[in-house]
Image (cartoon, rainbow, N blue to C red):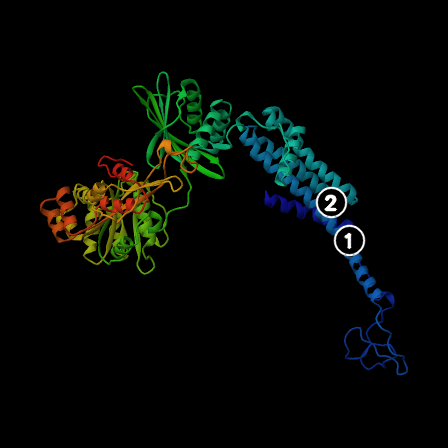
Amino acid sequence: MRSVFVALCMLLLPGSLSASRALAQDEPPGGAEFQAPVEDGAPVEDGAPVEGGAEGEFAAPADAPPAAPVDPGAAWAQTAAGYRQFPWGVVLRVAGLALVALAWTAAADWVNRDAQIFELNYKKWNPIVFFPFVAAAIGFAFLPMPYFVRLPLVALAALGSIVPYVLLHNRSVQPHQTVLTGSWWRFLTAGLLGKLGVKVATERQAEYQKGAPVELIAMGADDANLDNVNLLKARQSPGYLLLKDLIAEMVDRRAAKVLLDYGQQGVAVRHEIDGVWHAGEARDRESADVMLAVIKTLSNLSVNERKKKQAGQFAAKYLGKKHLCPVVSQGVPSGERVQVTLITDKSRLTTYESLGMRDALQKEWEEIMAADRGLVVFSALPGGGLTTLTDVSLEETDRLMRDFVAIESVQRREREIQNINVSTFDPAAGETAAGLLPKLIRTYPNVYILRDFSDVDAAKLLMEQIEDERLVVTAIPARDGAEALLRLLQLKIPQKLFAETVTAVLYQRLIRKLCPDCKVGYPPPPDVLKKLGIPAGKVQQFFRPPKPEEIEKPCETCRGIGYYGRTGVFELLKVNDPMRQLLVQQPQVDLLRKAARASHQRSLQEEGILLVARGVTSLPELMRALKPDEKS
């Protein structure tokens, strides 16, 4: 549409200039009495230009009196005369025509988009709006007529090309969606005054715009038009406002997920906050059903399917932030279970400190990541921040002095990290990571990143590269560092080669932090200190969440939970020679753990106790987070 606007301005410009050319013509300075230049050799008379002098200089007669002083009033009058001689008429005429063309261009663009949204045959209305105005503009540009006639005619042509569509639009939409009506002008005025701090009430609000200030966005359809259709359908349902309230509640409570269990009598609601499920307010079946229909409509899922598994997503905007909302529904014996996840575009964690890693551990891991050779492994529970842990380590590693290359499936792309070259393969096309590696090896990178070692051939090729002074990075879910080593062996990679090349495992477990505004200190019992291996008198206070009787009302920060946010508990397992022998001869988790303790390597529990002693978390939370069967 910008090119259309420029073309119209170029078209209307000549007519405006021709109508105003007379105003732009000025006589030369000095009028008709200005003397022509003197030819070479001619005698110079009094008052004639001096040869070789600057333009405008004149020779004064020998007996002429001294020059009179310059009159400031005359100089001001000369400047004002020059100002009046500027072609202001041309500028104003061109500006007027340009504003008309700009307004029509914006209106034509609105017609194009609006006709597609409301399915009003945009292919028909685009030429109806475009060609009549352009034809009129061409005619008015070349017809001899005064400007005060030309401009109104051009404006009338612009308005006449838009009005027919406006009339059709207003007949085809709901009252709050009409344009150029009395309510529309009042709504527009209220919006403009609102930006100036003046609040004006307006009745122009659809039913779906009421309730929580959440904007829902349909996603998942094959094209944007179908998404718009789904959105319009969803807005007609009373469940639309219920879903807006649900999203607002999730954000306000910091819930990452909500689980809706549909039963015969009602719907149980649970929120996952900082990795722990909390009971929410139960809902009646009728209202929850209409809300679920809206969820499925926005996600382009089948509303009537209540047994088979379905997956989709929609989006929401609330408090200035956009949230992606993946949806999974599945029939269960009691009815149906629906999970809605809230993925917010938060600021990314990019440093070891932001993960919660203590300084001494940071330095140890930095040295391992800076090594020229070896196999380093990242590990965590499923959903325990494994991707973030790996990304942060790569971000913190020097990538300027060494060449990094990552091998990824096109179906599972990782976040882009600066100075890491990514090569992809497509399993659907029969491609494998192993098939990609020979070509990459010939480029001689220093560091290979293959997060999934399930391709045994690729894993073998990479471990062979370690013998040529290469560093290899991989990742695998597990419950601790020792189990991560055995899980890699279970992939059937060469056992001896793995034992020779693996260097270290960095394992992470997420743990909730105590709310800083309501945590309560208490003296730790001596027997607890002894059991934890803390010398008597070393720690004066432990901290815990407040008991109900200790507070008058729930804490506004954590909303009565007692915890706010999470941090990492880390285990750095450095593989030594005794552990290498175990990997070859007796690969058992307990034996690997004992070997690590024998070499004075701190366990997850010992690292967690440091957090308890520092008041970051509580002892009950540490026990919960380190349960063997903990899944979050």
Rendering coords of residue 541 (x, y %): 30, 44
Camera-side residue of 391 and 627: 627
Proximity of marks 2 and 1: CB atoms separated by less than 8 Å = no
Residue at position x 42%, y 43% in the image: 346
Task: Tell me the crowding category of disc 2: few under 14, some 14 to 19, or many 20 or more residues within 10 angstroms, Cα based.
Answer: some
Residue at position x 85%, y 73% in the image: 69
Q: Which residue is mark 2?
A: 142
Q: Residue furthest left?
A: 585
Q: Which residue is mark 1?
A: 21
Residue 507 shows in the view: no
Q: Residue furthest top?
A: 264
Mark 1: amino acid: Arg
- From what the image shows, is residue 201 above or below residue 42? above
Compared across the picture, whether 310 is left or right of 216 comes to: left
Mark 2: amino acid: Phe
Rendering coords of residue 24 (x, y %): 78, 56
